[in-house]
Amino acid sequence: QVQLVQSGAEVKKPGTSVKISCKTSGYIFAAYYIYWLRQAPGQGLEWMGVVNPVDGGTSDTQKFRGRLTMTRDTSTSTAYMELRSLTYEDTAVYYCARDKLDYYNGMDVWGQGTTVTVSS
Amino acid sequence: DIVMTQSPLSLAVTPGEPASISCRASQSLRHSSGYNYLDWYLQKPGQSPQLLIYVASTRASGVPDRFSGSGSGTDFTLRISRVEAEDVGVYYCMQGLQTYRTFGQGTKVEI
C-alpha cells in the first residue's frame, strides 16, 4: 500500500539544524510532488514548500527562504527537508504529503508526522 | 497570498444530524481548467490530516458519501449529511491554486 514514513522525533538546540526524511513506497515516486508542512502546538497547518521528484526543483515560502532545503533521492524514493538556524518558534510537528504531478488531486497521502522540539 | 477564512471556528454537533462548514477565499480559486482548486481535510485527534474533498466537490478515495463539497469562485461549503462520532476533529479548507498553499484556520467539530 502507499506509505510515506517519516523519521523519528528530534530535540534540537536553538541555532542548530534538523533534517527529516520521508520514505515513500507503494507508488511511482516520480509521479507525485512531495510537500512539506508543519503544525505548531495547538495551531493550524502551515505549508512550507514542495519538491519535484523528477528534477529536484523546489519552491518554498518567503518565510523560510535561506533556512530551508528540500531534496530527494530517487534511488531510495525518499524526500528530505532540512531546516537551519532553528528557533523556539520552529517547535512543531512536520509532515510530508504527496500530490500528483500531472493533474490536481489534493494531498491524498500524508506521513505520520515528525515532532521537532527546539529547546536549550 | 490567498487568505482562507473558515466559519464557524467551533461546531458542536449531534450524531445523526447534518453539519456544514463554510470557507471563503480572498480571490477566486477557479483554475483555467474550469476546476476550483479547493480541498477539505480532516485532522482527527492525534492523527495526520486526511484528504476528504478535492477540486471543491470530488470525494477522495474511501471517503464516505455523507461528506459533500460545493461552491465555486470564492465561497465553498463542506456538508456532512448525518454526523457520526468518528467525524470529530478539526476540518481545514486549503487552496491549491497557488504553489504557496494556504489553509483556513480550522473548524473544530465536537459531539
Image (cartoon, rainbow, N blue to C red):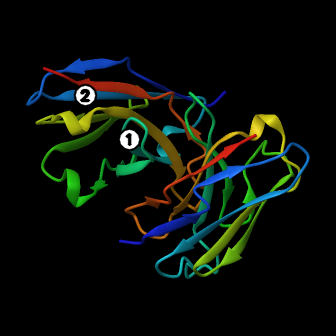
Q: Amino acid at mark 2?
A: Lys
The quadrant holding residue B87 is top right
Of B87 and A59, the residue lying toward us: B87
Vertical comparison of A103 with A107: above or below: below
Seen in the image, is B4 located left or right of residue B82? Answer: left
Seen in the image, is B6 located left or right of residue A76? Answer: right
Label 2 resides on the chain identified as A
Of A70 and A115, the residue lying toward us: A115
| Mark 2 vs mark 1: in front | 1
Disc 2 to disc 1, how far (Cα)? 14 Å
Regarding mark 1 in the picture, which secondary structure is present there?
Answer: strand
- Mark 2 packing: few (<14 Cα in 10 Å), some, or many (20+)? some
Residue A105 appears anywhere in the view? no
Label 1 resides on the chain identified as A
| Label total for image | 2
Name the residue rendered at 11%, 28% in the picture: A14
Quick check: do tags 2 and 1 share a chain?
A: yes
- Mark 1 packing: few (<14 Cα in 10 Å), some, or many (20+)? many
Extreme residue toward the right, this view: B16
Name the residue rendered at 56%, 49% in the picture: A107
Task: Find residue B78 and report its horizontal and vertical position in percent.
Answer: 72, 61
Q: Amino acid at mark 1?
A: Arg
Vertical comparison of B26 with A65: above or below: below
Regarding mark 2 in the picture, which secondary structure is present there?
Answer: strand
Task: Find residue A56 and report its horizontal and vertical position in percent.
Answer: 31, 47
Vertical comparison of A6 with A39: above or below: above
Name the residue rendered at 67%, 67% in the picture: B56
Residue B91 appears anywhere in the view? yes
Which quadrant holds the N terminus of chain B? bottom left
Task: Find residue A104 and report its horizontal and vertical position in percent.
Answer: 58, 61
Q: Which residue is mark 2?
A: A19
Q: Which residue is mark 1?
A: A38
